[in-house]
Image (cartoon, rainbow, N blue to C red):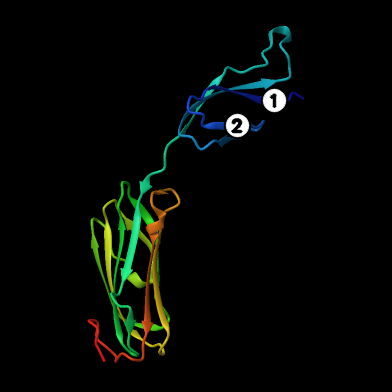
Amino acid sequence: AQSLRFDTTVVADPGGVLAAVAVAAEGTLTFELTGAIGQALVEVVLIDDGGTAAGGLDRSPAFELRIEVTPAPQIDLAVAIDDDREQVGVNGMLRYHASIENRGPDDAPAAILTVDVSPLVRTTAAACEAMGGTVCPDDITAGGAVDLPAGGRLDLVLDVEVVASPGSVIETRLNVRAPDDREELAPADNDGFDRTVVDDALFASSFEGGEP
């Protein structure tokens, strides 16, 4: 029985995108990339071991494969959260102002938003305003996937009641994660954090704050 194999030759790879390339006997193409951006041209020939006696042919005509590596779309997601308070009284109220935005240059479909509200507070109200083609989720506090077009933004207002004892530290966090097929330009600002201390020297206060 004849055996077959594919012979591969890298004809052109000016950007150096290919580290290795091969075609298995059953026709499966595999390749390893270097991480560079560009195009490579590969020539593939099918060869058998039947020889060329009696005018036979042991090589197929060459065919070419083009392997192109393009840069991932780039995005700059950012979040911020603040309740404008360093301390709060027992049973007091806090109002968080938060934002989630995509500074571009490309869209960020299905970015993953995580809203981690402290268990030391009880949410009493939540409101969301969408800008730049973004749509507010049904429940912004639940987080999940959100579409953030370039220039899009979500503004969140979250009212909570403190249910912690004096000396407790209320920590509320906000995080947005880029989709896997996007390059995040500034991941350091994907996390937001607010910290407020419960102080028994303060009376329960409104959102604007109160003095004992």
Q: Position of residue 17 (x, y in %)?
A: 51, 32
Amino acid on which the number 1 mark rests in the picture: Leu
Amino acid on which the number 2 mark rests in the picture: Ala
Q: Can residue 184 be seen in this view?
A: yes
The quarter of the picture where the N terminus appears is top right
- Secondary structure under the numbered disc 1 in the rendered image: strand
The quarter of the picture where the C terminus appears is bottom left
- Secondary structure under the numbered disc 2 in the rendered image: strand
Which numbered dot is residue 4? 1
Name the residue rendered at 26%, 53% in the picture: 151
Q: Position of residue 87 (x, y in %)?
A: 33, 82
Marks 2/1 in contact by CB < 8 Å: the verdict is: no
Position of 19 compared to 176: left or right?
right
- Observer-side mark, 2 or 1, equals 2
Q: Distance between the residues labelled 2 and 1?
A: 21 Å
Name the residue rendered at 24%, 63% in the picture: 130
Q: Which residue lies furthest to the top in this view?
A: 54
User: Foreground: 26 or 113?
Assistant: 113
* Sequence-earlier tag: 2 or 1: 1
Asked if residue 115 is positioned above or below residue 133 in the image, the reply reads: below
Name the residue rendered at 45%, 34% in the picture: 37
Q: Can residue 178 be seen in this view?
A: no
Q: In which quarter of the image is residue 153?
A: bottom left
Name the residue rendered at 40%, 87% in the picture: 164
Residue under label 2, please give it.
Answer: 20
Asked if residue 29 is positioned above or below residue 139 in the image, the reply reads: above
